């Protein structure tokens, strides 16, 4: 049964277990009951896309999955996955055009872009997941905060996924003031305004309100480096200030510093507590949010499962072994994205190996396989740093 402000599935009779799964309030519930509900939801979402998407129906038929059901861990591991790169060259929908409520792309201004289409349910359910995780960590506040977004200042009809995500995160605490570090140029492009970012941080420190810093870590690092080069003193942002990164260092790998070093730099120069320096991971091809715990591990929420696959055979790997990251979820009704194989390399670990108190398994991001010509939001954004390196 749909509760409160939970969104409703398009067809409650066909997607009742999908609804029940997304209605779960505890984001990191773990155990047999959650697994059983997840498998039931997977059967519903597989049937949904098989009936509404000709491409997906043919894929299942070719892989011998026509009448198979998910009844165990091995079954959803065996489910045919779609590589994220496929969505860069194909527009795949399981809904009519008039049902599209949001259209997002995965990259910046140029390059290959995943074109993802979402109906109202898929958007709403994904936003509820983020809200439940924020609530779990105590980050929902009625007190106003200042926002500095190290992301693209939106253009009209702006569809870039990371920019949309950063803006959507501002709903969890009232906006006192909001500024962007990647400013519009007036010609359809963006420039990294490092001095504007420094000035904003200085003014926010004087204002005394908590500050929430979202966006690409490469730009935050570049800003702190410039402050250091200019001999500017450390700032003391108000207690409760936090960072939440997304997009990674892609395209700036040669300038990337270890995560622990960036955390130490933020603590020293901005006064933000280590436990509130968090990273997020996700993509437009797979919209379940993965948010670090206080020990900086990506625990898998109850609404998804993670499989790590051998880069040569795609066979599932045991804990600690690196391979392709395969996300499995059971809620997006607008496109068959319930088993997506990413280009990212990762390794999974049992929840007990973290020590933060969560039982849910977690994964480490190791890198990205085969950069090639594929670009992401961070790749396009990283090019803006080239003119600010001096």
Image (cartoon, rainbow, N blue to C red):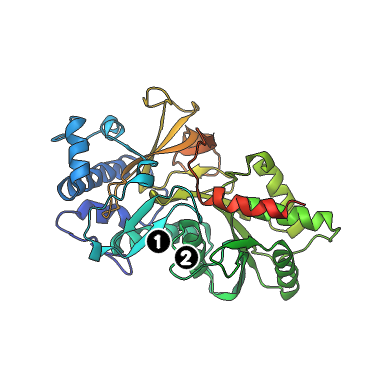
- Secondary element under disc 1, as helix, strand or loop, is helix
The relative height of residue 318 versus residue 102 in the rendered view (above or below) is: above
What residue is at 39 percent from the left and 46 percent from the top? Answer: 88
Residue 204's x, y, as percent?
Answer: 70, 71
The relative height of residue 177 versus residue 330 in the rendered view (above or below) is: below
Left or right: 241 in relation to 140: right
Left or right: 196 in relation to 93: right
Q: 186 or 215, which lies in front? A: 186
Q: Quadrant of residue 38?
A: top left
Residue at the disc numbered 1: 127
Left or right: 222 in relation to 166: right
Residue 99's x, y, as percent?
Answer: 24, 64
Which of pointers 1 and 2 lies earlier in the amino acid sequence? 1
Residue 83's x, y, as percent?
Answer: 36, 38
Report the mark closest to the observer, 1 or 2. Answer: 2
The reply to whether the C-beta atoms of the residues labelled 1 and 2 are less than 8 Å apart is yes
Q: CA distance from mark 1 to mark 2?
A: 8 Å
Q: Quick one: label 2, few (<14), some, or many (20+) residues within 10 Å?
A: few
What residue is at 83 percent from the left and 54 percent from the top? Answer: 229
- Secondary element under disc 2, as helix, strand or loop, is helix
Extreme right residue here? 231
What residue is at 18 percent from the left and 38 percent from the top? Answer: 58
Q: Quick one: label 1, few (<14), some, or many (20+) residues within 10 Å?
A: some
Residue at the disc numbered 2: 168
């Amino acid at each position: 049964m749909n509760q409160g402000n939970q969104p409703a599935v398009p067809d409650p009779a066909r997607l009742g277990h999908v609804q029940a799964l997304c209605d779960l309030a505890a984001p990191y519930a773990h155990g047999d009951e959650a697994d059983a509900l997840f498998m039931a939801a997977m059967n519903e979402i597989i049937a949904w896309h098989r009936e509404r998407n000709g491409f997906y129906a043919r894929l299942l038929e070719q892989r011998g999955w026509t009448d198979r059901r998910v009844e165990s861990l091995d079954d959803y591991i065996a489910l045919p996955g779609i590589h994220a790169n496929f969505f860069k060259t194909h527009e795949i929908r399981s809904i009519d055009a008039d049902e599209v409520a949001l259209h997002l792309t995965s990259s910046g201004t140029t390059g290959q872009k995943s074109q993802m289409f979402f109906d109202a349910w898929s958007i709403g359910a994904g936003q509820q997941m983020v809200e439940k995780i924020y609530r779990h960590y105590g980050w929902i506040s009625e007190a106003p905060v200042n926002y500095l977004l190290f992301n693209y200042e939106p253009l009209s009809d702006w569809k870039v996924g990371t920019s949309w995500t950063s803006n959507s995160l501002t709903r969890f605490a009232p906006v006192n003031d909001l500024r962007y570090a990647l400013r519009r140029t007036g010609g359809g492009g963006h420039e990294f305004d490092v001095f504007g970012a420094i000035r904003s941080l200085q003014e926010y420190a004087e204002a005394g309100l908590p500050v929430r810093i979202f966006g690409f870590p490469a730009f935050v690092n570049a800003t702190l480096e410039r402050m250091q080069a200019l001999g500017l003193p450390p700032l003391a942002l108000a207690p409760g200030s936090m960072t939440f990164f997304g997009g990674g260092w892609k395209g700036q790998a040669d300038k990337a510093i270890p995560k622990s070093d960036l955390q130490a730099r933020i603590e020293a120069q901005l006064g933000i507590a280590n436990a509130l320096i968090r990273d997020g991971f996700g993509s437009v091809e797979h919209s379940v949010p993965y948010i670090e715990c206080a020990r900086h591990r990506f625990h898998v929420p109850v609404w998804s499962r993670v499989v790590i696959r051998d880069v040569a055979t795609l066979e599932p790997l045991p804990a600690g072994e690196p391979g392709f990251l395969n996300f499995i979820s059971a809620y997006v009704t607008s496109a068959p994205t319930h088993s997506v194989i990413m280009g990212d390399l990762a390794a999974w670990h049992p929840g007990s190996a973290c020590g933060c108190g969560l039982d849910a398994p977690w994964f480490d991001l190791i890198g990205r396989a085969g950069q090639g010509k594929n670009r992401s939001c961070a790749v396009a954004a990283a090019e803006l740093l080239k003119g600010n390196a001096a």
